[in-house]
């Protein structure tokens, strides 16, 4: 068939760049043993676009989206000829005081919308389709809190890259051409001790985060001062080039159960960048000077996935 110029479509990433939403679901599942379960899961994820369209069409203004992440073991079980160059499991990060555990997860579904009911509906239909091919390992329903604050009371997400810098930070490029348009994603569920946090004076909280609390202005650090969360997560390579990631953290919680948390999600072009951030936070930079956010935040899950471009995702069904 004759190929028209518009047939040569550019690579289409999943909705990695979806704007921060009002509601989100983070669903992590493991795939049951056996080829049948792996085949079923592979077919369902390859066709997730049709489910998102079916639910999302009911209110297009709600901008429903769903990113599918595939873990390292699951990728192998899906029997593909090639693998994303940097896909590897989440390795525990053990610091002198705090540890980032590695927990099970074969598939991640990051569902976002302006309406929590659409997130719910998509998750319901998706789990129905997956049936007993998977077991839910973790499920968190997040909400946008006030003016995009986390439950520690700070505005979260300000320094996220946008536009072309977003693509540069979050999407694989020519360096791994078969997987360009994909993204490595790391998730961690943190539980906060809000009583301990609120006992810390605001001025010290601001030094811990690296920004002012009320008006969200970045703070300069004095030489020799212990690094803030912001500085620990500023990653510069040997050539002085800064490497960023794209985050869409969401608060979650049940005050009646005294459960307060932040669900961390970071998308990166290069997985090592997130791994280095975690090393800085948990081990410290310099070693021992860990992120004091962790004194009131316990990481209870941790897993890594690859979010392939839509073309690669759909191709998994072939
Ligand atoms: C308890 C969990 C966490 C909370 C409550 C939290 C909160 C925040 C806040 C309030 C900021 C400042 C505003 C902003 O630019 O977004 C921030 C910045 C940042 N965080 Fe986190 N964060 C958490 C975990 C993480 C983790 C696990 C990573 C990476 C592995 C990370 C990476 C970053 C980065 C890269 C920045 C931007 C630094 C900059 O360039 O200024 N955060 N975080």
Image (cartoon, grey):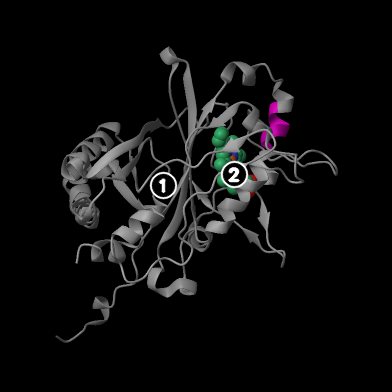
Of the pair 10 and 266, the residue shown nearer to us: 266
- State the residue lying farthest toward the bottom: 2
Residue 188 percent coordinates (x, y)? 48, 39
What is the number of the mark on residue 206?
Answer: none
Structural crowding at the residue carrying mark 2, measured as other residues with C-alpha within 10 Å and reported as few (<14), some (14–19) or many (≥20):
some
Which residue does the image show at 59% across and 31% down from the upper left? 154
Residue plotted at (51% across, 54% down): 162
Q: Tell me residue 259's x, y (percent).
A: 46, 20
- Rendered location of residue 208, percent (x, y): 70, 33
Ligand 1 is in which quadrant of the figure? top right
Residue of label 2: 93
Q: Residue at x 21, y 84 (%)?
A: 3
User: Which x, y percent locates residue 160?
Assistant: 54, 49
Towards the viewer: 84 or 32: 32
In the rendered image, the residue lying farthest to the right is: 224
Indicate left or right for 186 with 136 as reference: right
Disc 1 versus disc 2: nearer the observer: 2
The mark that comes first in sequence, 1 or 2, is: 1
Q: Is residue 146 left or right of residue 315?
A: right
**Residue tagged 1:** 19
Residue extending furthest toward the top: 256
């Amino acid at each position: 068939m004759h190929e028209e110029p518009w047939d040569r479509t550019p690579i289409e990433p999943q909705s990695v760049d979806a704007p921060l939403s009002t509601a989100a679901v983070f669903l992590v599942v493991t795939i049951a043993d056996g080829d049948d379960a792996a085949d079923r899961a592979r077919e369902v994820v390859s066709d997730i676009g049709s489910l998102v369209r079916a639910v999302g069409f009911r209110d297009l203004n709600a901008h429903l989206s769903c990113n599918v992440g595939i873990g390292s073991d699951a990728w192998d079980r899906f029997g593909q000829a090639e693998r994303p160059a940097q896909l590897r499991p989440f390795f525990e990060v053990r610091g002198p005081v705090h540890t980032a555990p590695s927990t099970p997860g074969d598939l991640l579904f990051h569902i976002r919308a302006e309406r929590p009911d659409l997130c719910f509906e998509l998750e319901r239909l998706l789990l129905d389709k997956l049936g007993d091919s998977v077991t839910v390992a973790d499920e968190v329903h997040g909400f946008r809190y006030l003016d995009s604050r986390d439950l520690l009371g700070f505005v979260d997400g300000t320094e996220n890259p946008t536009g072309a810098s977003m693509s540069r930070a979050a999407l694989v490029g020519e360096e791994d051409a078969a997987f360009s348009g994909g993204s490595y994603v790391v998730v961690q569920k943190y539980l906060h001790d809000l009583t301990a946090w609120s006992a810390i004076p605001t001025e010290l909280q601001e030094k811990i985060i690296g920004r002012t609390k009320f008006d969200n202005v970045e703070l300069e650090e004095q030489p020799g001062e212990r690094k803030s969360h912001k500085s620990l997560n500023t990653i510069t390579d040997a050539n002085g080039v800064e490497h960023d990631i794209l985050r869409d953290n969401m608060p979650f919680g049940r005050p009646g159960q005294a459960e307060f948390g932040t669900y961390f999600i970071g998308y990166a072009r290069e997985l090592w960048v997130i791994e280095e951030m975690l090393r800085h936070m948990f081990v410290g930079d310099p070693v021992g000077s860990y992120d004091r956010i962790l004194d009131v935040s316990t990481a209870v899950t941790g897993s890594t996935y690859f979010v392939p471009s839509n073309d690669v995702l759909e191709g998994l069904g072939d």
